Image: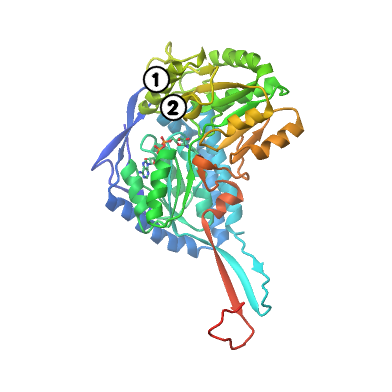
Amino acid sequence: MREYGLYIGGEWVGGASGETFQSFNPYRQQPWATLREATEAEVDAAVQAAQKGNETWRAMNGGARAEILNRIAAVLSANGDDLAELESTDNGKVIRETRSQMQFVARLFRFYAGYADKLYGSTIPLDQPAIFDYTTREPYGVVGLITAWNSPISLLGNKLPAALAAGNCAVVKPSEHASVTTLEFCKLLEKAGVPPGVVNVVTGGPKVGDAMVRHPGIAKVSFTGSPGVGRIIAATAGQHLKPVTLELGGKSPNIIFDDADLDQATVGALAGIFAATGQTCIAGSRLLVQKRVHDEIVERLAERAKAIRMGDPLDPATEMGTAANEPQFNRIMAAIDSAKGDGATLVTGGARATGAGLDDGLFIQPTIFSGVTNDMKVAQNEIFGPVLSVISFEEEDEAIAIANDIPYGLASGVWTTNLSRAMRTIPKLRSGVVWVNTYRMVAAQAPFGGVKESGFGRERGEQGLLEFTNVKNVMIDFSGEKRDPFAVKN
Ligand code: NAD
């Protein structure tokens, strides 16, 4: 068993004393780490440490901050495989994905390092020629970063590099279901020479997150998680008039038109739902297929789904890992049972996966339902597991209507070889991301985020940086005039 305390002001605090909880390895279904449930006083200590850290961090020029961010990238890159192993142990995600995620987070640190000394404002010509107007971009100070269990370091990577580059310090809370790598990451931050207090980590459940959102010393919250918790956080933040960025769930439509390259589209549909065991916000969990190619696509997908190699998440040959934790396993199984009751046709899967190397773990068979209508629960509710709903359509407009008929709006996929069709479809899709002839593609430069109940605000790209800044406008009057004190000057 590993034991972890909290990471506050560059120190490990509390050890595994006080109130603790355990993290489970979902492959072996065994506890493997003991962590500390932070108290409100410890959250407060973390905020104070971040405020102190911010004095140092803000006083550094952008070039010096960039240097440290680049060092974090180098240390993470060099230690990425070890961290990936821990993450796969903690949440059952396959090592081939966690390894590449660590390298991508290193890329994000490098990307935002490039911005740290290029946080430009603008000079603005006004109607009044004798006023010099310019803007600067200022950090919030201390930001609170709260993440989900499905990809702790990757989700942190969407927030922390941008927050630091902009001059903020952070109090981070990973999910109580998978906190180990966020704490281990702090050891890498130390190796990279990050000053004490710049990044602080508190662990625990909802109470700890809530204490962060309420804390007056946290000026902004960036949250990744479920829409239900997103609502609570937005409401609490609203009471404190605190800005929030919300990266929430999805039920993304992946649309295959009948002129698509079916080999590519099949791979895209598989990647959309079975990569990461479907436990990804961008899962293409509603597959909309045009009638003429519907049966062929379903057949191809079923054949490939049955052959998906499940097993030890740490084995690079494994394609699909476990459900990340027991509550999530139970939620997925309940959703499968409900779909069967809804009248959807079970094409393949639909049960717990058992057999050699699988019996101890929380494995679920890759599951495909066809004959789904968009009003069924299996089509409307985010399952966050390897469960695909296939919906047949005839016309382009019908596909767009079905795609948009959902409370979520995170991502959409479009498969077509007809450029005009793609260009017609893109603006009609109500989602923050559209992929055409690809799916689940991420890039440091490209902004990511949702509309509707998938949240608001953006991560990655320049937009992700600006989320962690406020604009200050400055007017300097060099006219030397004496003005009328009772009239606004315009
Ligand atoms: P969750 O909402 O249950 O928990 C997320 C985090 O919020 C955890 O750290 C949790 O402890 C904390 N939390 C819970 N209640 C809180 C409260 N009242 N105040 C403050 N913090 C609180 O989500 P989850 O089950 O960990 O993750 C799955 C969800 O995350 C899915 O809906 C998925 O789509 C979403 N997700 C979204 C993205 C994205 O970028 N849009 C990425 C990954 C996951």
Instruction: Determine the secondary structure under disc 2.
Output: loop
Q: Residue at x 64, y 34 (%)?
A: 435
Q: Earlier in the sequence, mark 2 or mark 1?
A: 2
Name the residue type under label 2: Gly
Beta carbon at label 2 within 8 Å of ligand 1? no
Name the residue type under label 1: Gly
Image position of 66 with respect to 30: above or below: below
Which residue ends up furthest to the bottom in the rendered image?
Answer: 482
Q: Are marks 2 and 1 in contact (CB under 8 Å)?
A: yes
Q: Nearer the viewer, residue 420 or 361?
A: 420
Image position of 358 with respect to 399: above or below: above
Q: Is residue 484 left or right of residue 141?
A: right
Q: Nearer the viewer, residue 451 or 121?
A: 451
The x, y position of residue 232, in whole percent, is: 38, 45
The x, y position of residue 298, in whole percent, is: 60, 15
For disc 1, the neighbor class at 10 Å (few under 14, some 14 to 19, many from 20) is: many
Q: Is residue 82 left or right of residue 33?
A: right
Q: Which residue is mark 1?
A: 361
Quarter of the image for residue 107 reads top right
For disc 2, the neighbor class at 10 Å (few under 14, some 14 to 19, many from 20) is: many
Residue 8 is at least partly visible in this image: no
Q: How much space separates mark 2 and mark 1, taking CA atoms?
A: 9 Å
Q: Which residue is mark 2?
A: 92
Instruction: Determine the secondary structure under disc 1.
Output: loop
Q: Residue at x 65, y 38 (%)?
A: 428
Q: Nearer the viewer, residue 179 or 364?
A: 364
